Image (cartoon, coloured by chain):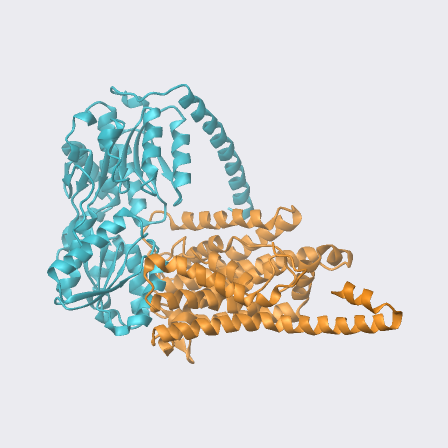
Amino acid sequence: MVHKVLSEQGAGGITTTAIRIRESGIERRARFRGLAEPLSLLVALAVLIGVFSLLNERFLTASNIQNVLTQSAIPLIVAVGATLVILLGSIDLSVEGVMGATGMTWILLSNNSRGGADLGPWAWVIALGVALLLGVASGLIFTALKVPSFIVTLGMWYVGLGIATMLYGTDLLPRLEDEGLKGWTSRISLGLPNSFWVALLVIGLGILVLRNTRIGRVTLAIGNSETIVRSAGLPAFPVKVAVFAIAAVLSGLGGILATVQLDIGSPTVGSGVLFIVIPAVVIGGTHLGGGKGGILRTVLGVFLLTILNNGLILSGVESSYQSAVTGAILVAAIVFAAWSQRDRLRVAK
Amino acid sequence: MSLKHNRGALVRFAAIAAVAALALAGCTSTASGAGGSSSSGPIAKEDLVLVASVINTTNPYFIANIEGAKALSKKLDIPLEIIDSQGSSQTEISKIQAILAQGKKVVMFVNTVASSDTPTIVDAVKRAGGYVSIWWNKPDNFEPWDAGDNFVAFQKHPGVDSGRCNAQAIGDALGGKGNVIMFPGVQDSTTSQTRVAGFEAEMRENYPGIKILENQPSNWDPQLANQNAKDLIAKYGDQINGVWSADDGMQLGAIQAFDDAGLLDKVKFASDGLYPDTVKLMKEGYGNNAIVGETFHRGYMASAIGLYTAYLAATGEIVPSELPKEKRTSFFDIKCVTPETLGDYLKYDTPTAAADFVDQLVEKGPWDTEPATLIGGGGPEVLPKP
């Protein structure tokens, strides 16, 4: 288009003006697009909610909304970490392993039916320490040895699962015996489930880190071009390790909350979370290549997936059709949400 | 032990394991290429190795499988190898092939990940001249008598009986009136399907006042059952009077969801397996005696029966092709447990229970050991007519 305009205009002065007009047009559209994407995701979400509430009047009751919020809390917490890692242009596949290792460590050190030590708050510290170690290990191997994050974290997934299985041993299932904590995640405080409050806190902190700290800014810059970041003398190495560490600690926190929610320690407590979290980040519009995206968008992605799952059960879709229907609705929702991004020069991979 | 050290060791171990696996994979292809025909005739005890293959090592049932295999290994004084399939048919088959390639004659128990794994495993064992018993899952049209003596037996507890037993417990507890939700396991698992069919048939035939509101397959996963239960509570609220799960793991997840919703006191639960954790909940009358019925069977009994049957074939004490069909495709008794009869089953969870069972088993043979005696078989389990 630009070429055509240029060739038609001919004379120099007119060309400059035409280019300026075009530039401002592009800029305006870019700004619109920045808004349009989350907006269309919101619209998709609203349509889903609308349809589901027509299909079953219980969908929009307070108790179901609280139920959806409880179910989305753990994926939300883990997804904040996953968003940061994906903004780097990397990926963290270790979430389920880290959740298992942390959850098992935590319950065995808390008041549980197998007996043993009850370390109270120290159980949290030690369990999250395990997660931190796994995260730092992933980060260091990834940065220092330049092994692709995909492989490192895939390995770390199994290391975490292995630790969890060893801790589990061959004894009885460890059940949580702490009456104060039992059912804590789905208990309601100020109208919202406790686990959702934790998720809100994590989301808030995540946004703060991304927008207002050096880690956040360097993370986005690395996602755009690591070469420039490094030649500008910015601390790419420590930031990358820090982001993997943060992501692992958040997975660990998710693992502990999942254990509290189930009331039982299990190495596979995180099963299925990875395949909510990564799609949610991408559906939210964070680029897998890094550099573009954000945490609030991921939140929309998590809600879309959780509501889809809940809504299909409530509207009575037969279980054998559920996965096919989930997939079809999901693809339709993404096509709609990403409609505004069909830029001519945009490359989808 | 520092993590660093641990990781180093793990990496080293992984490397050795990988090299070994590759080497063994090489051997397998040569061995089978050389034309290993199925072996018959007795094998000396010193040449045998027991192998128990389980779906994973975190589910209490599979842990009990391992326990039974260990007890039999000790009793017969034959070394034991454990295969952890990690929930994957591929992992299961490649690990089995690696063990077969070591050259020893195997006596194998496999709790198959999927029905369709059975022919591949049987074929590999046959070529290596070993003997295998398959538990729980096999294709209906693949019978041991068609596959030869190396496929000694297919064994399981009947799912229909299990489902019917649970339905009676819930039906009676609700006085024949009320609404029930169901949590099957993996939807295409025969074990789950037969249990579901038995439960539904019993309700239809004998408890017409009970309505099944919905079933949500929960993949044997307590976490998923917990979420699905939360969704169904949101959907039906206090209309739900009874909850059935295809195994105790999922039931624990479902119970927690009802507990969180403050509904546990009003809802009755029944399920399969009577896991030790469930025994504890039943004994203490958790949630106003929420668990009203269970079926009893133990993983250690399954693995011990399976391995011992294969062992008898390997040593020539039985000739599979001469056995009646119900001793090749066999159903073992499953007991119906209520809170009143719970006391009778506590003896099967003492620390020496597996060893005691194995003692009995070696004395009485694979088909006559209480409480898991042979009650039928000879072909695929017949589902009640819908």
Tell me which residue sits at (30%, 53%) in the image.
B185
In front here: A282 or B99?
Answer: A282
Chain in orange in the render: A
Which residue occupies 19% across, 46% down? B158
- Left or right of residue A202, residue A120 in this image: left
* Left/right of residue B349 with respect to residue A176 in the rendered view: left
Taking the image as drawn, is residue B178 in sight? yes
In which quarter of the view is residue B98 placed?
Answer: top left
Residue A197 appears in the rendering: no
Q: Which residue is nearer to you in this view: B332 or A167?
A: B332
**Residue B284 at what x, y percent from top left?**
21, 63
Residue A29: x, y in percent? Answer: 67, 72
Chain identity for the colour cyan used in the image: B
**Residue shown at 23%/56% (left/top)?**
B271
Note whether A171 is above or below B225 in the view shown: above
Please tell me which residue is depicted at 22% across the width and 71% down the height of the picture: B266
Q: Nearer the viewer, residue A194 or A117?
A: A194
Name the quarter where the C terminus of chain B is drawn. bottom left
| Position in image of residue A215 (x %, y %) | 66, 64
| Location of residue A315 (image quadrant) | bottom left
